[in-house]
Image (tube, grey):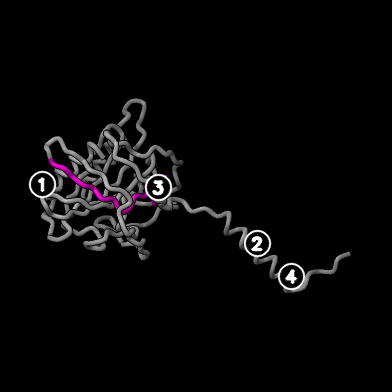
Amino acid sequence: MMSSPGPAFAGLIAAAALLLAGCTSTTDGSGTPASSGSGNSSHDFPSASVSGPTAASSPAGPASGSGTLSASTHPVPSKPLKTVTVHAPSGTNYVLKIWADVNDASCFDHAYGKPMVTFLIKHPCQGLERYLGTTTVKGNPVGFAESVTGFPGTASDPYAYSNAFTRLENADGTGSISDLMREGYRLPLGPPAVPASEAFRVISQDNGVTVWDMWYLADTTPQNDPALLQMAEDIFVQF
C-alpha cells in the first residue's frame, strides 16, 4: 500500500488542477481583430449566430450618454490596419484609414443603457463588427466609430427587430452599442473618447443596421454636422 503524499506533493497537485481549470475557461464576447480586406460594393453585416444569454448576465450601464470608458487601452498600431478609398456618387472621394477592426459574436455585452441591453438580450444580434478610423472631409481631419450588426426577423416581418433596434438607437436616454473607444481602443490623434458634440447617424438596410459616430479631430464638431452626416451616407454604400 502506498503511503499518503507529503505536503509538497499535495501542493503540486493543487497547482496543476488550478492551471488546468484556467486553460479550459472561456470568455464571452471578447473582441478579436478581423483580417483586413478591401471594401465591398454593398454593406454586409456579420452573420455569426449566437444563442440568447440570460438576463442575469447583462452588464449594468448608464441610461444615456457615452458610458464609462474602459480602464485598459489597446496600443494604437504604427500604421493603419488597412486603407480604403471610397468614391461617392457626388464625386467626393474619401480615403479611410482603419485603426481598429473588432468582431464579436454578440451585442448585449458590448452595449450600455438598460433599455438597449434588455432589447439585445431578448433579441440577440447576428454578430457585431466595429471599426475605428480616420478620413478627411472638406480638408478637415475626421475621426469615426462605426458599429455594424443585424437581426433576424419574424415570418411575417423579416425586418421587425432591425427596425426596432434602429428606433431604440435614435431615441434619447436608451443607451447604444459601445463604440471601440469605450473599450480602450484609440486613434493616433484626437480625444480619447467620442466627444459630446458629434454627428450621429443610424443607417439600416434590410435586416442590417450601421451606427455611426463622427467628429472633427482638430476642431469643435457642430451637432449633427451636415457634411459628416453626408459622409456616413456616402461611405455606407461602398464600405
Q: CA distance from mark 3 to mark 2?
A: 30 Å
Q: Amino acid at mark 3?
A: Asp
Quadrant of the image containing the N terminus: bottom right
Q: Earlier in the sequence, mark 3 or mark 1?
A: 3
For marks 3 and 2 on the same chain, the one whose residue lies earlier in the sequence: 2
| Residue closest to the eye, 173 or 239 | 239
- Does residue 181 appear in the picture of this structure? yes
**For the residue carrying disc 1, how many other residues have a C-alpha within 10 Å: few (<14), some (14-19), or many (20+)?**
few
Whether residues under marks 2 and 1 lie with C-beta atoms below 8 angstroms apart, the answer is no
Marks 4 and 2, how far apart at CA: 13 Å
Residue to which mark 2 is pinned: 17
The earlier-in-sequence mark between 1 and 4 is: 4
Q: In the image shown, does 111 or 213 lie closer to the viewer?
A: 213
**Farthest top residue in view:** 156
Instruction: Residue under label 4, please give it.
Output: 9
Q: Relative to 213, does residue 7 appear above or below in the rendering?
A: below
Instruction: Point out the stretch of residues depicted in magenta.
Output: 92-109
